[in-house]
Amino acid sequence: MNRDSDIERLLDEAERHGLCVTAADDNQRRKLARRVLCGELTNPHPRLYIRTGIWEGLNPIKRKRTMVRTLARLYPDMVFAAESAVCMFDLEQPYDIHPDNELTVASPSRSGIRVFSKTGFTKRTLYVPNMQPVTLNGVRVTSLTRTLFDCARLLPFECMLPIADSAAKSGVDMASLTQFPTSRFDEANKIASILTYADPLSDNGGESRARAVMIAGGYMLPHLQYQFPNMDNPEFPLRVDLIWFLPGDVTVVGEYDGMAKYGNTWTEVNTHVNKQCKRDDYLRKHGVTTIVHFSFDDVIHRELLYRKLDDAGIPRMH
């Protein structure tokens, strides 16, 4: 199709600043909409447009952040809440809390849901009394403690624990969430669970999510980031993700094998596997009875993780 130089400049400028393009008038909107129809552009939110290749190259957190930052320019008084606020904080957060077609904003007076009939986009309005928003990179969001509170009461436990662990690791006093009242018993229980299990020792979001799945399954809680002495290099002890000390001198280690550990090429994968085998041998020589390696796929399909834990003899406490 013929290139419109003005539209190209708009797209280039938005791309440089990590934003979407917004149509200034009906003429621009029609031009942008035609490019959406041919697949050249993506229309993630009413009035927002971005090159499809750029959009597909962003992970869900960056997609949500791009939408939020653009909308903040369109609507300077808008305050984002819950998952649409947490994307602006430097915290571990699972991708699946950031669907492309959902957004949450705060209101001092009401709650509600609006679904745009043409696109199916869902805009949630969350009642936030005594709102004291903060501004991050030009975006007004609910305070960190209020954001954590709303995420804790609205998100599934396994999605919230990675955020809570990360916040605790950054120095947030998770007990501060109790300053906000809950109106429902189930929400109070969800807040209490997060306060009980949030742990700053968790190394990454994958480990946190795995621990949440273990908690849901009733398994004995592991110790986190336990260190074994490294005789070859005493200044750098070997640290394991999870460890259980069981009766009869049985010691079980759990290792979360995220894809980042393996690398992107066969050479990198083989190198990692060889190092892993040597590491496992070392741990066994130092008293580890069983080593359970698990992946993100095991965590998502929790019955796979449960089978590995059962085979290793990890007891269920309830």
Image (cartoon, grey):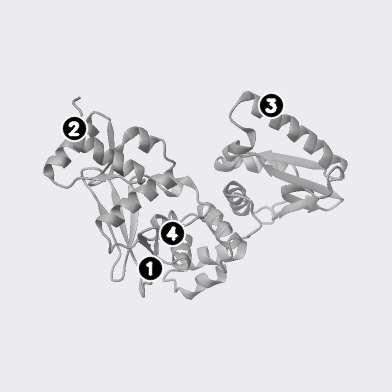
Determine which of the numbered discs, if any, sits on residue 270 in the image.
3
Q: Residue at x 80, y 52 (%)?
A: 246
CA–CA distance in space, label 3 to label 4: 41 Å
Q: Amino acid at mark 2?
A: Asp
Helix, strand or loop at label 4? It is helix
**Mark 2 or mark 3, whichever is nearer to me:** 2
Q: Amino acid at mark 4?
A: Leu
Local crowd at mark 1 within 10 Å, few (<14), some, or many (≥20)?
Answer: some
CA–CA distance in space, label 2 to label 1: 40 Å
Q: Position of residue 123 (x, y in %)?
A: 29, 54
CA–CA distance in space, label 2 to label 3: 49 Å
Q: Are marks 4 and 2 in contact (CB under 8 Å)?
A: no
Q: Position of residue 204 (x, y in %)?
A: 60, 49
User: 294 and 138: which one is in front?
Assistant: 138
Q: Residue at x 72, y 40 (%)?
A: 292
**Mark 3 or mark 4, whichever is nearer to me:** 3
Q: Position of residue 41 (x, y in %)?
A: 27, 35
CA–CA distance in space, label 4 to label 1: 19 Å
Determine which of the numbered discs, if any, sits on residue 154 in the image.
4
- Residue 57 versus residue 150 in the image, above or below: above
Local crowd at mark 3 within 10 Å, few (<14), some, or many (≥20)?
Answer: few
Local crowd at mark 2 within 10 Å, few (<14), some, or many (≥20)?
Answer: few
Q: Which residue is mark 1?
A: 133
Q: Residue at x 75, y 42 (%)?
A: 312
N-terminal of the two: label 4 or label 1?
1
N-terminal of the two: label 3 or label 4?
4
Helix, strand or loop at label 2? It is loop
Quadrant of the drawing holding the C terminus: bottom right
**Mark 4 or mark 2, whichever is nearer to me:** 2
